[in-house]
C-alpha cells in the first residue's frame, strides 16, 4: 500500500506513520489557545517531528461538537504563516485541516501537501476542483451532519456498511473528477456524528471500511468517547487510551494515525509491529 502526494510516495507496506495534530485555534477541545501564534506553533511542529511524526496536520478552525465556523479570512490568517514557516525548514508532509476550498488553495500555494477535509469534500463545491488541479494528497473523512449538529441523535442503518458505502461513492466521484486513486486516503470520522456504540462498531471493523488498497487514517486522539471507557475525564488524560487503540488498530492494518501525543503513539505502533508475525 502506498500514498502518493505531489510526486512523493509514502510506503505503507510495513511501518505505520503518525500525523501530528497542530491546532492553531483558540477553541479546539484539547489544545485550543496553546499554539495560536507562529512561533509557538512552529516550535510544537518541530517537537512532534523530533518525536517521530512524518506528517503535521495544521488546522485553523475547531471541529469539536458545537464549534462555530470562522471566516475564510480568519482561517487563512491563522494557518498560512505557520505552513509557510514550516515549509521553509522541513521537507516532510504538511496537511491543512479545512473544509473550505479557498483555505485549501491558499495552503497548497504556501507549501502544504495534503488537504484533510472533515466533510469528505462535500461542504464546499469548489474543493474537488482545487484538489483535482493539484497533486496533493486528499483525506476524505466521514461526518454525519456538521460540527454544530453532528452529535444530535446520529443514526445509521448499519454504521460500518453505511460508511463503507460513503467511501465507495466518494472514491468513484473523486477519481472521475481527476483526483488519482493513489492520492486518496479515508478517515471514518470517529466521534463525528457517532454514538459510543457507533464508534466501537467502527473500531471493531476497521479492516472492512475502505475500498481495497486505499489507506485508512484513524483519529481517536483524546476524544470524549474514551472517557466512557476508562477514567480519563480530561482530554490530556486520554493519551494512554489513545495509544492502546492505536496499537490495536495497527493489528487491523491501519497505517496512518492522527494524534496529539506523537511519542506515545509512535512507541505503541513500533511495539505492535514488533509483535506481529508479518513484521
Image (cartoon, grey):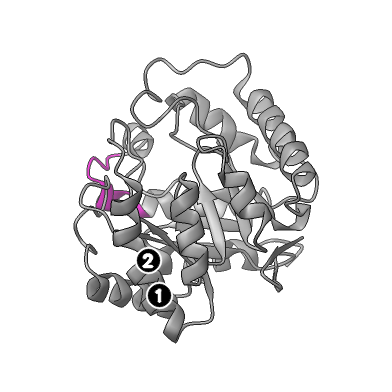
Q: Quadrant of the C terminus?
A: bottom right
Horizontal and vertical percent for residue 45? 36, 73
Can you see residue 97? no
Query: Is 218 left or right of 265, judged from the image as shown?
Result: right
- Within-10-Å neighbours for mark 2: few <14, some 14–19, many 20+: many
Cβ atoms under marks 1 and 2 closer than 8 Å? yes
Task: Write down the residue under mark 2.
Answer: 80
Q: Residue 84 got which mark? A: 1
- CA–CA distance between discs 1 and 2? 6 Å
Task: Label 2, secondary structure: give it.
Answer: helix
The residue range painted magenta reads 231-239
Q: Position of residue 113 (x, y in %)?
A: 56, 66
Left or right: where 146 falls relative to 23: right
Residue 65, quarter of the rendered image: top left
Query: Please, what secondary structure does the residue beneath circle 1 have?
Result: helix
Residue 106 in the magenta stretch? The answer is no
Q: Residue at x 63, y 68 (%)?
A: 274
Q: Residue at 56%, 68% (x, y): give it.
A: 270
Amino acid at each position: 500500500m502506498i500514498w502518493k502526494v505531489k510526486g512523493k510516495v509514502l510506503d505503507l507496506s510495513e511501518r505505520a506513520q503518525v500525523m501530528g495534530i497542530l491546532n492553531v485555534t483558540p477553541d479546539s477541545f484539547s489544545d485550543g489557545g496553546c499554539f495560536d501564534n507562529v512561533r509557538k506553533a512552529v516550535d510544537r511542529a518541530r517537537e512532534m517531528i523530533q518525536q517521530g511524526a512524518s506528517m503535521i496536520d495544521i488546522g485553523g478552525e475547531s471541529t469539536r461538537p458545537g464549534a462555530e465556523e470562522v471566516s475564510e479570512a480568519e482561517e487563512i490568517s491563522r494557518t498560512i504563516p505557520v505552513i509557510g514557516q514550516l515549509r521553509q525548514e522541513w521537507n516532510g508532509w504538511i496537511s491543512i485541516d479545512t473544509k473550505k476550498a479557498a483555505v485549501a488553495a491558499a495552503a497548497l500555494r504556501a507549501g502544504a501537501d495534503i488537504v484533510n477535509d472533515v466533510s469528505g469534500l462535500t461542504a464546499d463545491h469548489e474543493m474537488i476542483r482545487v484538489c483535482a488541479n493539484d497533486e496533493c494528497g486528499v483525506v476524505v473523512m466521514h461526518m454525519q451532519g456538521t460540527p454544530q449538529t453532528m452529535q444530535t441523535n446520529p443514526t445509521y442503518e448499519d454504521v460500518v456498511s453505511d460508511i463503507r458505502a460513503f467511501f465507495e461513492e466518494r472514491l468513484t466521484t473523486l477519481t472521475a473528477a481527476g483526483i488519482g486513486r493513489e492520492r486518496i486516503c479515508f478517515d471514518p470520522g470517529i466521534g463525528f456524528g457517532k454514538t459510543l456504540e457507533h464508534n466501537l462498531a467502527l473500531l471493531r471493523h476497521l479492516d472492512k471500511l475502505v475500498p481495497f488498497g486505499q489507506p485508512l487514517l484513524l483519529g481517536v486522539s483524546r476524544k470524549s468517547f474514551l472517557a466512557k471507557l476508562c477514567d480519563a475525564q480530561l482530554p490530556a488524560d486520554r493519551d494512554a487510551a489513545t495509544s492502546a487503540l492505536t496499537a490495536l488498530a495497527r493489528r487491523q492494518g491501519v497505517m496512518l494515525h492522527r494524534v496529539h501525543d506523537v511519542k506515545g503513539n509512535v512507541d505503541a505502533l513500533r511495539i505492535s509491529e514488533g509483535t506481529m508475525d508479518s513484521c
